[in-house]
Image: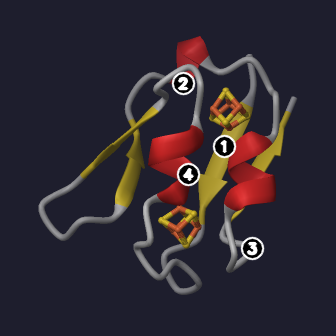
Amino acid sequence: MASITLNRSLCKRCLLCVEFCPQKVFTTDQDNYPVITHLDRCRSCYLCIYRCPDFAVEVTE
Ligand code: SF4
Ligand code: SF4
C-alpha cells in the first residue's frame, strides 16, 4: 500500500489534491486542510503530487 504525507507547513489549502484525486482518498478537516481518509483506495497515480502547487504532498510505495 502507498504511503502519503501531507506537509501542513507548505499547504495553502487550495484543495486541488482533494478535487483531482480520482480515488477520493482525501477529505477535509474543520480547518479545511486535506486529510488522508481512504489510503487503501490510493493507486499511486501521483496526480495529487503533480497538482499540488506547493509541493506539500509526497506519495511513496
Ligand atoms: S494541493 Fe497541495 S496546497 Fe493544495 S490543499 Fe492539497 S496539499 Fe495543500
Ligand atoms: S497518488 Fe493518485 S490515487 Fe493516490 S492519493 Fe494521489 S491522486 Fe489519489
Q: How many marks?
A: 4
| Amino acid on which the number 2 mark rests in the picture | Leu
Choose the circle earlier in sequence order: 2 or 3. Answer: 2
Tell me whether the residue at label 4 lies in contact with that at label 2, contact meaning CB atoms closer than 8 angstroms: no
Q: Disc 4 and disc 2: Cα gap in Å? A: 14 Å
User: At 74% across and 17% down in the image, what residue appears?
Assistant: 43
Q: Is mark 1 within 8 Å of ligand 2?
A: yes
Residue 39: assigned label: 2
Amino acid found under the numbered disc labelled 1: Ile
19 lies left or right of 35: right
> Closer to the observer: label 1 or label 3?
3
Q: Disc 1 designates what residue? A: 4
Which is more foreground, mark 3 or mark 4? 4
Q: Can you identify the residue that label 4 sits on?
A: 17
Q: x, y (%) of residue 39?
A: 54, 24
Classify 10 Å Cα crowding around label 2: few (below 14), some (14-19), many (20 and above).
Answer: some
**Residue annotated with mark 3:** 55
Q: Amino acid at mark 3?
A: Phe
